[in-house]
Amino acid sequence: MKAVSAFGLAVLLSVACVARAEDDFAKKILGPWLVDKSEELPPGATVDFLKDGKVTVSAKDKDKEVKHDGTYKVEKDKLTTKFTYNGKTLEQTDTIVKLTDEVMEVRDNEKRVTTFKRKK
């Protein structure tokens, strides 16, 4: 009986830790991130997540600096971003695979992973 109780307690603690980590995603994501590896964004592009739910992506396209503003929300391990380009709204929901103080990895619906490093 003690083994079952210990196992049950271990499972509950694990679930609580995962839930807490996911709650922390909304706080940990704040600030500027540099794209390290991506199939969608150029390396060195900056993605800045602001406290008010706004996000800015800045990148170089040839010799020109390009900047796009949008919104984002974090719910558990899901990151949803919304941008408007040329009158069309694009919304994407990615899964946060890893988020530490220094590294973030997100996976899109097509299983492509983008890796970011915290901008210092």
Image (spheres, rainbow, N blue to C red):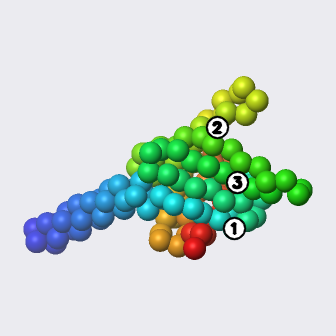
Left or right, 110 with reference to 49: right
Q: Position of residue 50 (x, y in %)?
A: 49, 52
Q: Residue drawn 31% across and 59% down?
A: 20
- Decide: is 87 above or below 18: above
Quadrant of the snapshot with the N terminus? bottom left
Left or right, 108 with reference to 16: right
Callout 2: helix, strand or loop? strand
**Going by the picture, which residue comes out furthest to the top?**
87
Callout 3: helix, strand or loop? strand
**Going by the picture, which residue comes out furthest to the left?**
1
Res 78 visible: no
Q: Nearer the viewer, mark 1 or mark 2?
A: 2
| Residue topped by disc 1 | 36
Q: Residue drawn 89% across and 56% down?
A: 62
Q: Residue drawn 68% across and 63% down?
A: 35
Q: Amino acid at mark 1?
A: Asp
**Going by the picture, which residue comes out furthest to the front?**
64
Q: Nearer the viewer, mark 3 or mark 2?
A: 3
In primary-sequence order, the first of circles 1 and 2 is: 1
| Residue topped by disc 2 | 83
Quadrant of the snapshot with the C terminus? bottom right
Could you give the CA–CA distance between mark 1 and mark 3, rounded to whole angstroms?
A: 14 Å
